[in-house]
């Protein structure tokens, strides 16, 4: 980050030398988030330890919550739930009450030097130092029907490590070297946006994408149990759904400084980010930067209702961070006006409600820009830019233990997330910061998760969406990278009105995916899945079917069901 942000981090580091209670975080996308979500809902009461709409979640608070659920006599847990709790605590065992929650290995390697604990290849624990280090390895193949490239292969190799020093400084690092061959429709997406989903710089050799993936952070506490500061390079996520209209973990990693304040029934987060505007993939040149600051306040208003308020601004300054946007508690719209700079300010409301100890309802309202008079007129005013999400979850559905069902609807109007300044749009490294479909779409998606026995995880996912498509010469508001001042008239030369939810060339997509994963040992999975996708719109209808199989160690399964 730039000087102001670095100085703030160094100042906080100095303060942290007098306290403790740092933490490390559960990586986004891991299976344990489903466990936390179902246990909180099944308990019937929101936990002050979790605040699951703000991710990543602290491992320390995760373990604290799980240990409470183990002792909760009013919570009816299945044997699988209790097994999953023990498993999750073991993976983050350094945060257990005795700081030794990781399960001992039955057969450690090399005289107890390696795999002394089940989850960790290297495990070092002393009074003042903790280290967990593990290899990251995958090998997977895809057989895509009617693809002339035949079999597609992907491999990832790297290292993951986390720990703490003197219980004052937490650290995490992750690095992989990746060679990826993706299904044809994903390759089309890469060609269109010049980006590999979730990655930054890449090179292409035929149908193979070659890239490095690195992330890491330092975490320390300013006020024990209340304020943590994290300085790193990773992703963040706001929301309770499969998608987020605020900030998702879909795109590339970015540099950030995060201040998280937890007190009473409140969790307040400040996020300062250094981003990269859209660019032509190239090397050996200094890339430009843009910046973002976000606030997210999460409140457990009652024991069953959580409300969240979101505010963000994306802006560009040459070689500096706008100091006015670094104030932890402020309205960015007023700052933007006071600065006389039309930066991209956005707002949002998030809500989650628990019901009957089996149901959860959630939603988001994202406001980019709108005029109430024009909204009431209902004539498709272009600057009424907003998105809406509705979703629900049903845990132990229909009385079947460990059968969980989730459904979600997302709708985003044209030109939402876009900006007249191509740098200030809601993107990073040629990828959306929020929903991967961009804007001008309506989507319904759902997933059924079932764990019939220990170590076997089954899922059935479906998705259907309709969206408008922008061609090279038109701009109806779907492509959020385009300058909204170049919009194409919707009706009779009017560039202000007539834009429906889905404007431009209407495209449709339906996708269904069935997957199974079996855990051979801690964090070592065998995966097998089948996906079918049908797409129609700008060209002839196309259908894609593929079978995917692989093995992965300490790696979150790659999901191509985003588009």
Image (tube, rainbow, N blue to C red):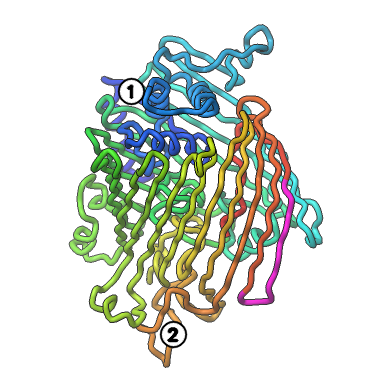
Taking the spot 27% from the left edge, 51% from the top edge, the residue there is: 309
Q: In the displayed structure, would residue 451 be above or below residue 164? A: below
Query: Is residue 319 among what the camera can see?
Result: yes
> Residue 279 versus residue 284: which sits nearer the camera?
279
Q: Judge depth for marks 2 and 1 and give the one in front.
A: 2
> Residue 373 versus residue 306: which sits nearer the camera?
306
Find residue 499 and report its horizontal and vertical position in percent: 41, 80
Find residue 189 and report its horizontal and vertical position in percent: 61, 62
The stretch of residues the image draws in magenta is: 537-548
Query: Is residue 4 among what the camera can see?
Result: no
- Res. 503 mark: none
In the image, taking residue 435 as reference, residue 535 lies left or right, namely right
Taking the spot 41% from the left edge, 91% from the top edge, the residue there is: 493
> Where, quadrant-wise, is the C terminus in this rendering?
bottom right
> Where, quadrant-wise, is the N terminus in this rendering?
top left
Residue 403 colored in magenta in the image: no
Residue sitting farthest toward the top: 111
Q: Which of marks 2 and 1 is nearer the N terminus?
A: 1
Q: Residues within 10 Å of mark 2 (few under 14, many from 20)?
A: some
What residue sits right under mark 1 in the picture? 21
């Amino acid at each position: 980050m730039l000087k102001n942000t670095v100085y703030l981090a160094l100042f906080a580091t100095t303060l942290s030398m007098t306290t403790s209670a740092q933490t490390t975080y559960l990586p986004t996308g891991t299976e344990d988030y489903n466990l936390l979500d179902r246990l909180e809902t099944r308990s019937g009461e929101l936990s002050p330890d979790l605040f699951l709409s703000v991710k990543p979640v602290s491992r320390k608070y995760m373990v604290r919550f799980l240990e409470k659920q183990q002792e909760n006599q009013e919570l009816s847990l299945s044997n699988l739930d209790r097994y999953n709790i023990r498993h999750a605590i073991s993976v983050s065992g350094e945060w257990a009450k005795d700081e030794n929650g990781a399960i001992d290995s039955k057969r450690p390697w090399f005289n107890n030097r390696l795999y002394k604990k089940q989850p960790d290849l290297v495990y070092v624990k002393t009074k003042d130092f903790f280290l967990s280090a593990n290899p990251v390895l995958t090998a997977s193949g895809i057989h895509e029907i009617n693809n002339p490239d035949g079999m597609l292969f992907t491999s990832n190799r790297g290292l993951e490590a986390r720990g703490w020093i003197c219980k004052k400084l937490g650290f995490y690092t992750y690095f992989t070297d990746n060679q990826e061959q993706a299904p044809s429709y994903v390759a089309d997406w890469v060609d269109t946006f010049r980006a590999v989903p979730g990655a930054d710089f890449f090179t292409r050799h035929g149908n193979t994408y070659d890239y490095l993936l690195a992330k890491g952070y330092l975490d320390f506490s300013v006020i024990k149990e209340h304020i943590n500061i994290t300085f790193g390079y990773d992703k963040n996520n706001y929301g309770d759904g499969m998608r987020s209209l605020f900030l998702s973990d879909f795109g590339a990693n970015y540099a950030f400084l995060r201040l998280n304040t937890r007190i009473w029934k409140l969790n307040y987060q400040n996020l300062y980010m250094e981003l990269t505007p859209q660019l032509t993939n190239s090397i050996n040149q200094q890339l430009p930067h843009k910046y973002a600051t976000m606030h997210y306040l999460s409140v457990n208003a009652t024991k069953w209702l959580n409300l969240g308020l979101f505010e963000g601004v994306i802006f560009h300054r040459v070689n500096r961070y706008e100091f006015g946007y670094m104030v932890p508690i402020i309205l960015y719209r007023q700052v933007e006006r006071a600065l006389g700079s039309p930066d991209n300010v956005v707002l949002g409301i998030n809500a989650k409600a628990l019901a009957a100890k089996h149901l959860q309802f959630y939603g988001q309202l994202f406001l980019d820009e709108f005029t109430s008079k024009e909204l009431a007129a209902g004539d498709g005013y272009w600057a009424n830019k907003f998105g809406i999400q509705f979703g629900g979850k049903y845990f132990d559905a229909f009385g079947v233990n460990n059968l969980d069902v989730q459904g979600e609807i997302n709708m985003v109007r044209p030109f939402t997330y876009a900006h007249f300044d191509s740098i200030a749009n809601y993107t990073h490294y040629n990828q959306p910061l929020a929903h991967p479909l961009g804007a001008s779409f309506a989507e319904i998606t759902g997933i059924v998760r079932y764990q019939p026995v220990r170590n076997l995880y089954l899922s059935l996912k479906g998705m259907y969406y309709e969206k408008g498509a922008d061609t090279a010469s038109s701009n109806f508001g779907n492509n959020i990278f385009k300058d909204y001042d170049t919009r194409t008239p919707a009706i009779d030369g009017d560039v202000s009105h007539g834009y429906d939810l889905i404007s431009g060339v209407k495209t449709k997509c339906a996708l269904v995916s069935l997957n199974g994963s079996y855990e051979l040992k801690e964090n070592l999975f065998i995966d097998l899945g089948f996906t079918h996708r049908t797409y129609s719109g700008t060209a002839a209808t196309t259908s894609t079917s593929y079978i995917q199989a692989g093995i992965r160690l300490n790696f979150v399964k790659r999901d191509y069901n985003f588009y």
